[in-house]
Amino acid sequence: MDILSTRIEYRHDSETHIATVRHPPVSMTRVELIRKLLGAGCSLIPNVERVPSYFNSLDRNIQRAIVEQHLELLPLYGLRMRGNAQIDSTLVEQIGTLSELELLELDADRPVAPEALASLRPLTHLEVLILRGASFRDDHCEAIPKLSSLRSIDVQRTGVSQNGAKRLRDKFPDAVIYVS
């Protein structure tokens, strides 16, 4: 994946600072999806390893301002869809376009079609998958794509049975499976 850079100017203590943020190429689809995810109440986790090292030494308010202004350009590490997030099958299907994600947490009170999880196949860097909510059942486990990158699957506090957990362990023998 090609990496692009964006110059960001911000003011702190009446001084103007310039930061360069590296990010993957941005398509209109990505920008629209990120705005839609934010509008649905999701939390995006930037990949801080690809953000300049001095970013962490900045005041938290300045960090927040930079992230809010340029979030769609920042490389993402993870996505948390929980709490009041308005998750539905369509939104889950669109997540597959965020191919750099390494962590995905879905907490759905409303039913999500098992087929929607199959659309996560393009997430070739996904290492941690967390599912929450009684709407996730054994058929959802069957639909999780076989990704070699998955190291941890957490299905605690879901409707997944012990039989469903066993099938997950069989399907992902190298992953740690957490089940209640």
Image: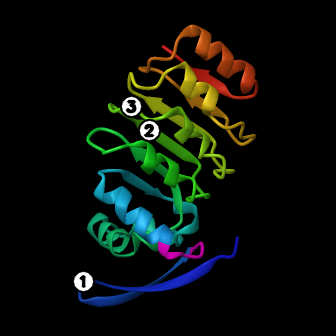
Range of magenta residues: 23-28
Q: Measured from the top left, where is residue 92 in percent x and y?
A: 47, 46
- Relative to 180, is 129 above or below? below
Main SS category, magenta section: loop
The answer to whether residue 25 is magenta is yes
The answer to whether residue 59 is magenta is no
Q: Which residue corresponds to mark 2?
A: 106
Q: Measured from the top left, where is residue 65 in percent x and y?
A: 30, 72
Q: Nearer the viewer, mark 2 or mark 1?
A: 2
- Name the amino acid, label 2: Leu
> Looking at the image, which residue is at 61% across and 32% down?
143
Q: Residues within 10 Å of mark 3 (few under 14, many from 20)?
A: some
- Left or right position of 51 against 71: right
Q: Looking at the image, do the residues carrying marks 2 and 1 touch, with CB atoms under 8 Å apart?
A: no
- Name the amino acid, label 3: Pro
> Looking at the image, which residue is at 61% across and 57% down?
99
Q: Which residue corresponds to mark 3?
A: 111
Q: Which residue corresponds to mark 1?
A: 13
- Left or right position of 44 against 174: left
- Name the amino acid, label 1: Asp
